[in-house]
Amino acid sequence: MIILTNTASQTLAPGQSLTFNTVFLHTGCAECHRPNTGSVILRQQQAIYNVHFSANIGASVPGPAQLAIDINGSPLIETTMVSTTAASGDLNNVAKNTAVRTCCCGPETVTVTNTGTAEVVVESPTLFIRRQA
């Protein structure tokens, strides 16, 4: 299990992934994270992982802000999080939870990416990943 966060506010351009600078908890070796990067490697093949993300987000200009959990650079559509704000600087809390099954070909990489068209401001993100089976 691994729980990550970032203590600083981040502004993500479209297509850019969130980075994490703090490891709250890390047990076992089923997940691997290099400090100050945005990716977590799911090391166990043919396993099932629970992936949960939450954060306060908003667009850098009034309008929609959009994030999604990615696996190997491909967004999982069911994890798309959208927050529409009326004013620049407004933030709303978003959260998604999903199960990910790894394949037999090698490790999978999890990131959280701006999948929208506007810059996204992210504060207090938490990424929680735990191997289930």
Image (spheres, helix red, strand yellow):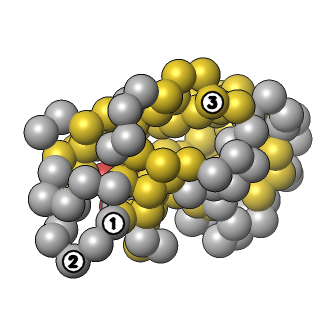
The residue where tag 2 is placed is: 105
Using the numbered discs, state the Cα–Cα distance from disc 1 to disc 3 in whole angstroms. 20 Å
- Relative to 58, residue 108 above or below: below
Could you tell me which residue is drawn at 47 percent across and 73 percent down? 73
Whether label 2 touches label 3, CB < 8 Å: no
Q: Which mark is residue 107?
A: 1
Q: Quadrant of the C terminus?
A: top left
Which residue is the extreme one toward the front?
A: 29
Q: Residue furthest top?
A: 24
Q: Which residue is mark 3?
A: 23
Specify whether residue 9 is in view: yes
Give percent across and percent down for residue 95.
47, 32
Please state if 39 lies on the left or on the right of 104 as rendered.
right
Q: Is residue 128 visible?
A: no
Q: Residue at x 15, y 71 (%)?
A: 104
Element at label 1: loop
